[in-house]
Image (cartoon, rainbow, N blue to C red):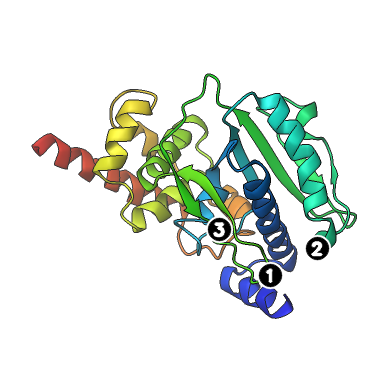
Amino acid sequence: MDAERDAVVAQFGVAVEQVERDHLVSYLLAAIAAGVGDDVHLIGGTALARTYLPGGRLSEDIDLVALGPRKPIAAKIDALLPRAVARTHGRLSWDPALSDIRDTEAARLVNPAGLSVKIQLLSARDRIVWPTELRHLEQRYSDAPEAGLRVPTLPAFAASKTSTWNDRQAPRDLWDLWALNRIGAINHDAARLYKRYGPTNCLPEDYLFRTPPSEAEWRSQLAGQTTLTVTASTALSAVALAWKRLGEQLDEE
């Protein structure tokens, strides 16, 4: 693990603690896939980082959607995860547990040294469930068990991340959109999904991309997860241009 840990530290330009958290996330994902894989979808930044953008940001948390009644799935995960990683990562405890909170809140798994991973289990009720596919996850570490979970499709990632940017305009969502654009994910399929499931039933308006996060906020939220090679302003301009050009192409068809 030490050599792999050092390689990941160098690759992402992050602290050792961040890599140790990412390593724990790999084991937790494997346990989730093995124990409740048919009951949940993996969404958010970690889903993206473990599929289409493995060289992007390191994982800090795990966001799941319960496909059935949330309460029994939460109880199953509460019992499953500490037991599944006890041999490799020591005794972990919930603070709080998934069963003790609402689906809009995040639980935490904490080890005796204070290393923690946030885990959220959302209910699918009254929530847009974007198209998904079963994907093998990038586990990054040779000792981590293999895992596969259902995650959003690539067009769904681009469309849903744009919708999330519309809701909260968080730096991490903008960074993900910028990285998605670099692999061609802001495309006709993403546009179709955004128009169908997005907040306005049309393509993103220009006003969504007028104000970037401050550089201080950009670095504060992202520098611990990746080596930043782009400013917030440049990232926003690139995403805005991608959606604008896509809209022009669709108008011509």
The three-letter code of the residue at mark 3 reads: Arg
Say which label, 3 or 2, has the lower sequence index: 3
Disc 3 crowd rating (10 Å Cα; few below 14, some 14-19, many 20+) is many
Horizontal and vertical percent position of residue 188: 24, 42
Residue 90 seen from this side: yes
Residue sitting nearer the eye, 236 or 251:
251
Residue beneath the point at 35% across and 32% down: 207
Q: CA distance from mark 1 to mark 2?
A: 10 Å
Q: Are marks 1 and 3 in contact (CB under 8 Å)?
A: no
Q: Circle 3 sits on which residue?
A: 57
CA–CA distance in space, label 3 to label 2 = 24 Å
Taking the image as shown, residue 150 lies to the left or right of residue 62, namely: left
Above or below 158: residue 89: below
Query: Which disc is residue 88 wearing?
Result: 2
Residue 70 is situated, as x and y percent measured from the top left of the image, at 66, 26
Q: CA distance from mark 1 to mark 3?
A: 20 Å
Which residue corresponds to mark 1?
143
Which image quarter is the N terminus in? bottom right
